[in-house]
Amino acid sequence: SIYLINRVKHFLPQKALKTLYFSYFQSHLEYCAVIASSTSNKNIKRIEILQKKALRIVTKSAFLAHTAPLFKQLQILPYRKIIKRAQLLLMHSIHYKYAPVILQNSFSTNADRELQYNLRNADEYVAPRANYAFFSLTPNVTLPLVWNEHRDLTPHRNPRSEEHTSELQSQFRISYAV
C-alpha cells in the first residue's frame, strides 16, 4: 500500500493521498490492534517506521523529516496510540457490559474477589501475574493494566446513550504528538 501511495503522490492532492492512506494503510493498523499489541517491541517499531514512511509520502515531506508535526497536521494517531485506544475501547465495552458475553466474564475487579475488607481500588480490574515476559504482553494482562491506568478518562454513564458516545469519543482522543 505504501508503494501505491508513493506511485500516485505526484498526481493527487494531499486530501486524496490522505484518503488512500486511511483506506489502504490505516485500516490494517486498526484491524486487531489489541491482539497486535502482544507482539514484540521490535515488530511494533517496524510498523511505526512504515507508518512514518507513509506519512512522509502523503505530505510529500523529505525522507528524514520529523513526523511529530506530520501526525498533528494530518490528525493521525501514531501506532502505539492506536493500540492504546483500541485497548481502552475494548475494556470500556467489557466494563459497561456491551461486549460479547465471552469477554465480559474474562476479567474481574478487586470487588469480585470477595475479600474480607473494603479496598479503595475495588473498582480496578485484576491483572493476572505473568511468570514470563512473553505472557506480560498478552491482552489478559495488558488490558486491565491499561484500563486501571486510564480510569479517569472513562465516563460513568449509560454506554448506549448518544450523549455518552460523543463524550466517550472526545475523551478517548489521544494527542497526535508522538
Image (cartoon, helix red, strand yellow):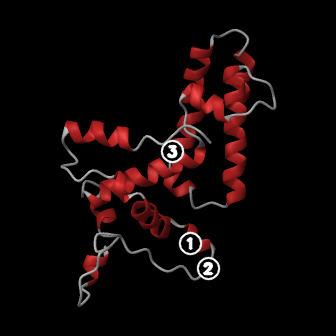
Residue that badge 1 annotates: 136
Q: CA distance from mark 2 to mark 1?
A: 7 Å
Res. 124 in view:
yes
Res. 1 in view:
no
Q: Amino acid at mark 1?
A: Ser
Q: Residues within 10 Å of mark 3 (few under 14, many from 20)?
A: few
Tell me if residue 163 comes above or below residue 126 in the rendering. Answer: above
Q: Quadrant of the C terminus?
A: top right
Specify whether 175 is left or right of 58: left
Q: Find residue 116 and name its label.
A: none
Instruction: Tell me where residue 109 sits by quadrant.
Output: bottom left
Q: CA distance from mark 1 to mark 3?
A: 21 Å
Residue that badge 2 annotates: 132
Using the image as rendered, state which of residue 31 and residue 97 is in the foreground.
97
Q: Residue at x 57, y 26 (%)?
A: 74
Q: CB of mark 2 within 8 Å of CB of mark 1? A: yes
Q: Residue at x 35, y 56 (%)?
A: 152
| Mark closer to the observer (1, 3) | 1
Residue that badge 3 annotates: 31
Q: Amino acid at mark 2?
A: Tyr
Q: Residue at x 56, y 35 (%)?
A: 26
| Mark closer to the observer (2, 3) | 2
Q: Earlier in the sequence, mark 1 or mark 3?
A: 3
Q: Earlier in the sequence, mark 2 or mark 3?
A: 3
Image spot of residue 136 (x, y percent): 56, 72
